[in-house]
Amino acid sequence: MRKLIATCSVVSICFLSATAVFAAGTVKIGGLFAVTGPAAFLGEPERNTAKMVVEEINKAGGIKGHKLELIAYDTSGDATKAVQLATKLIKDDHVTAIIGPSTTGESMAVIQVAEREQVPLISCAAGIKITEPVKKWVFKTAQNDTLAVVKIYEYLQKHKLSKVAILTVSDGFGASGREQLKSQAAKNGISIVSDDTYGPKDTDMTAQLTKIRGSQAQAIICWGTNPGPAVIAKNVRQLGIKTPLFMSHGVSSKKFIELAGEAAEGIKLPSGKVIVAELLPASDRQKSSLMAFVKDYKLHYHAEGDHFGGHAWDAVMLLKNAIEHGGDSRVTIREQLEKTHGFAGIGGVFSYSARDHAGLNKDAFVLVEVRKKGWVIVK
């Protein structure tokens, strides 16, 4: 009996020691961002923002005494590489949760890893299929392309523009957008008179636009991410097309204006509120978070915080909130993420549930227009 008691005491001491070490340790979170390659305009601000927010959380004492450790890898926008790096984060780095990837195609590829290994994944991409149907371990912070389509179609309805030409990029983001543009057209009184695509690496779309010019289109909607939409904007101007041109939220940053130059003037698109934060009324629930993010990003990186960096800000802060309320295990983080309600972030006010892992409604978007190399809110 004495030996048993002694043995139990030793085990108890070891357990308590292990607990103490864990309490004093760090919570590892992984990051998958397209820092290089065509989608770098997404991944670089996401990576920068994630690092910035983690540093600020740690400077403030961490989360319940735990410091966060961000282990971030560059996927280059490649889905195969994203899967390999997700596996590395889980198997070798032993992360508790993963933020990213940056694009829809990568996110769809990584979902199977997150689900199989039961690791919370908060995607920074927009495709609706990332979270519909709901996957137990997968959430997202980027606004659904469905909501972006609604924002454009509401404007067209208001201005009695019912005939539309769509030009979408042939990748995961473009395919998802094209599906939503088509599926929601009839219910919004819209008829699609021209439906064409372009390749992610195409450098001239005059053939598609010449076809559109010969149609009855009253508006053109381009769905893609840089640099393609900037090329299309320039081609529209070169061809003298006067039909109003709309872009997706995939180009919601100053980078699009830089790439398109004067051809960007007058283009409208749905965007998260961060790029027009200063123009929002004081009553807006997101304004304080938005202004803090813009200020912090400027201080750290001498550049403007944008819509895409905001996806990473939301992801880190949602994880922080989940850990504060439930603990730092993969299971409790997933459970607490699903219980998130009324979290005012950069991309919108998030309310997840067992049936909704996207958590936003159409109010997460505002319609903006390019004027004099800047953004204004379309009333």
Image (cartoon, rainbow, N blue to C red):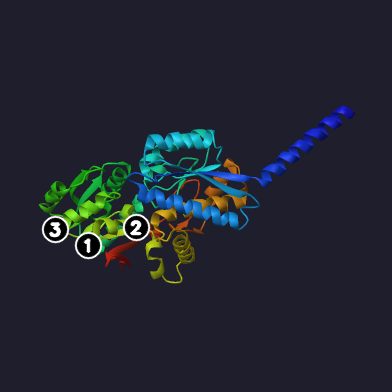
Residue neighbourhood size for the residue with mark 3, other residues' Cα within 10 Å, grouped as few (<14), some (14–19), many (≥20): some
| Residue at point 54%, 52% (across, down) | 54
- Report x, y in % for residue 299: 47, 62
**From this viewpoint, which residue is outermost toward the bottom?**
282
Q: Does the rendering let one see residue 273?
A: no
| Residue at point 57%, 48% (across, down) | 336
Q: Amino acid at mark 1?
A: Glu
Q: State the residue position of label 3.
A: 241
Q: Quadrant of residue 11?
A: top right
Residue neighbourhood size for the residue with mark 2, other residues' Cα within 10 Å, grouped as few (<14), some (14–19), many (≥20): many
Query: Along the horizontal axis of the image, is 180 left or right of 67?
Result: left
Q: Amino acid at mark 3?
A: Ile
- Report x, y in % for residue 59: 59, 57
Q: State the residue position of label 1.
A: 262
> Which is more foreground, mark 3 or mark 1?
1
> Which is more foreground, mark 2 or mark 1?
1
4 and 34: which is toward the camera: 34
Label whose residue precedes the other's in the sequence (3 or 2): 3
Q: State the residue position of label 2.
A: 253
- Report x, y in % for residue 130: 40, 43
111 and 28: which is toward the camera: 28
Q: Quadrant of residue 262?
A: bottom left
Q: Does the rendering let one see residue 322?
A: yes
| Residue at point 42%, 71% (across, down) | 281
| Residue at point 45%, 72% (across, down) | 282
Are the residues flagged by discs 3 and 1 in contact, CB closer than 8 Å? no
Q: Is residue 150 above or below residue 373?
A: above
